[in-house]
Image (cartoon, rainbow, N blue to C red):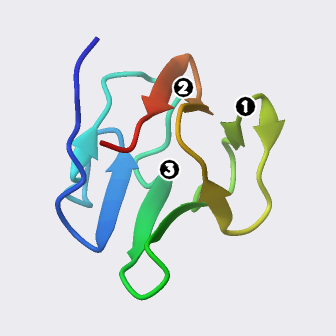
Amino acid sequence: GKEFPIHKLVMTIGRPGARKNDIELVDDTVSKDQASIYYDSTRKIFSIANESSTNPTKVNGHPISGPTILENDVFIEMGRTVLRFKKS
């Protein structure tokens, strides 16, 4: 279990590559530009958006098709990687 603190309004997630991701995953089933997590400071909510045209991003096992609000303690799946989102 590695932790990735969210410290910006937008955090990018993907494999290392041309885009410098904030969260880099060593998983060849994850795209280089897989997804982004957004923080809405007005509404105080986090959401995630899939940015890969070939690899789905799932929240609690369900593929997302647009920005999806992240509730506390949900699972985010990308390729073979599973992340747990926790608000502190």
The answer to which of 61 and 69 lies nearer the viewer is 69
Q: Which kind of residue does numbered mark 1 sit on?
A: Asn
Residue in view at x 52 percent, y 21 percent:
82
User: Quick one: which residue is furthest to the top in this view?
Assistant: 1
Q: Which residue is mark 1?
A: 60
Residue 72, position as x, y percentages in the image: 53, 41
Residue 22, position as x, y percentages in the image: 21, 52
Residue in view at x 39 percent, y 71 percent:
39
Residue 55, position as x, y percentages in the image: 66, 41
Q: Which kind of residue does numbered mark 2 sit on?
A: Thr
Q: How far separated are the C-alphas under marks 1 and 2? A: 18 Å
Q: How far separated are the C-alphas under marks 1 and 3? A: 17 Å
Residue in view at x 36 percent, y 81 percent:
41
Q: Badge 2: how crowded within 10 Å, few (<14), some, or many (20+)?
A: some
Q: Badge 3: how crowded within 10 Å, few (<14), some, or many (20+)?
A: many
The answer to which of 7 and 27 lies nearer the viewer is 7
Q: How far separated are the C-alphas under marks 2 and 3? A: 10 Å
Counting residues from the start of the chain, the first of labels 1 and 3 encountered is 3
Q: Which residue is mark 3?
A: 34
Q: Which quarter of the rendering shows the C terminus? A: top left
The answer to which of 15 and 61 lies nearer the viewer is 61
Residue in view at x 59 percent, y 26 percent:
79
Q: Secondary structure at mark 1?
A: loop
Which image quarter: residue 58? Answer: top right
